[in-house]
Image: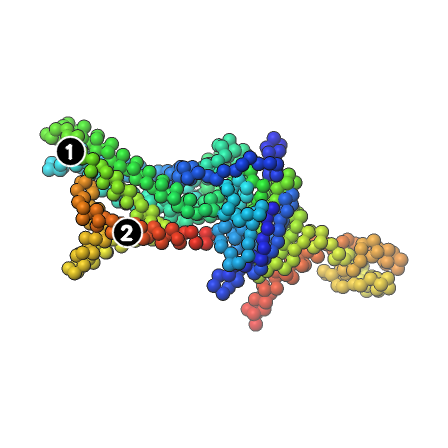
Amino acid sequence: MSTLTAAEGTTAATPAISPPSLLALTRVELRKSYDTRAGRWLLFTIGLASLGVVAIALFVDDAPKTFADHFAITQFPIGILLPVLGILLVTSEWSQRSAMTTFTLVPRRSRVLTAKVGAAGLLALLGVVAAALASALATVLTPVFTDSPMDWGIGGDQVLQVVLVQLLNVLAGVAFGMLLLSSPLAIVLFFVLPTAFSILVNLVGALQWVRDWLDLSTATTPMYEGDLDAQGWAQVATSVALWVALPMALGWLRIRRAEIS
Amino acid sequence: MITIEHLTKRYGAQPAVSDVSFSCEPGTVTGFLGPNGAGKSTTLRSLVGLTTPTSGRATVAGRDYRDLPNAGRQVGVLLDAGAQHAGRTGREVLTLSALVLGVGQERVDEVLGRVGLAGKPAGKRVGNYSLGMRQRLGLATALLGDPQVLVLDEPANGLDPDGIWWMRGLLRGFADRGGTVLLSSHLLREVEAVADQLVVIAGGRIVAQGSKQELLGGRGTVVRGPDRALLDRALHAAGIAVVPGEGDALVADAEPLAVGQAVAAAGVVLTELRPAGGEGLEELFRSLTHSDGTQQVQEVAA
């Protein structure tokens, strides 16, 4: 102990102190996503879900069997779990009260939020990579378990749009987390609100245009196959404005102003 | 160096803190005293940027906390030992902070040893920690960036007597090496032993502040004897003002030497003679901070 004391708490000239870089903060946020048991299970489940889906696809007779098909199918479970990951990345700070420590260490809160968005994006990319690996495995096994040959063909459009849709999925989660700051509330509302919205606009004929232009899941569905056309892109943009950009902007403001306790 | 100038924080119309001003110098420990709900935490949270004050300013080394380049390297903060993810291990909590601060893993091991959490406790989940262990982990987080300033809210909560003694030594050493320490407590005894300066807050306002000597000194001498009336007469005869003290004691408004001389001259027997200092501060603290409490009790009784 005596060897340590000399170095502690002295007012001796300190070397120039540099602020934590965004890269360092993003690393920290990434680490927070897997350094708890709950976080590790969620990541593991995402990997497992893509394997499960391709396993089913392999053994269902009339399911399509190309790499592109597997790649499209595996995105669905990942697309459901990524928003949860995004939500928890934000809300766990409040449910576990670590926000106080986080924002005391980095009082410029926007930097922490930027790092969280960055970490969420990287995790979405990892999710797509996991789906691709599971799809590759399924493609290799296709001739073993079925009569279909290996077919590795996949279009650049599909890869690009899948990556984009998964980024949107995770960011929608982050946005809901930022706006609501509560894990159960954000998770429930994330799934209930759009569903209720879809049911409503489908029931009322006059609201058809709302479904086409403001329902995120309807607008993004063609993206899993890479089939988005010009109007489709516009519809994705308007739905994203409502379900991702708006809640994130409001949530960002809320956290910047919030009293952290 | 911490400076708080005319800090006011209102929630709606309700003031939590009104016009609070004080400063903490390097090399000193400042005890920030007050009952629960007096505004201690609000003041400290305003200081570290978790709360935006309604008016007034709080600075560390002349800068707003939010403008410090790497806050944790300059100010070590422990506001709430429970503010940690229960699923992380103690070592992991410190590792995350170390990544933000830009200090190495060896520094994590160092502070773990420093607060007595090295070895097995470091690998346990914070959820399984006792309150005392969480306080130690919080203190480790505060020390991690080797700051010049420490801001601690009720750091002795949950520590056993050994832990409290250890913490006093740690804070004293930190200040003696030129550091600035601001710690809050609702217990006078807890800070009295370590603080150089005391700031007492009640109802959101500063009600007393000064060095420990200033607040302790000049409060008379406690004197006790088998015959209280005789003692009273002897002191009056010597021109020393006397008020009743605790139990059958008297508090004389004079130095112990003068009281002793007066009593000896009158040939009166004494059983106790000592400076009334400690009680003076405690009385002060009680009268300043408990007035609301007694009123409430009276209201309930009526």
Task: Please identify the quadrant where the C terminus of chain B is shown.
Answer: bottom right
User: Quadrant of residue B260 in the image?
Assistant: bottom right
Residue B217, how many percent across, how many down?
Answer: 73, 54
Secondary structure beneath label 2: helix
Image-based side of A245 in relation to B119, left or right: left
In this picture, is A52 found above or below B6? Answer: above
Question: In the image, what residue occupies the spot 80% across and 55% down?
Answer: B255
In the image, A244 versus B87, the foreground residue is: A244
Q: What is the image's colouring? A: rainbow
In the image, B296 versus B180, the foreground residue is: B180
Q: Chain of mark 2?
A: A
Residue B200, how many percent across, how many down?
Answer: 62, 56
- Identity, as a three-letter code, of the amino acid under mark 1: Thr
Instruction: Measure the C-alpha gap from mark 1 to mark 2.
Output: 34 Å
Question: In the image, what residue occupies the spot 53% across and 40% down?
Answer: B73
Image-based side of B19 in relation to A115, left or right: right
- Is the Cβ of the residue at disc 1 closer than 8 Å to that at disc 2? no
Question: In the image, what residue occupies the spot 32% across and 40% down?
Answer: A121
- Identity, as a three-letter code, of the amino acid under mark 2: Ala
Which disc, if any, is residue A66? Answer: 1
Classify 10 Å Cα crowding around label 2: few (below 14), some (14-19), many (20 and above): some
Image-based side of A43 in relation to B181, left or right: left
Residue A75, how many percent across, how many down?
Answer: 23, 40
Say which residue label 2 marks. Answer: A241
Viewer-nearest of discs 1 and 2: 2
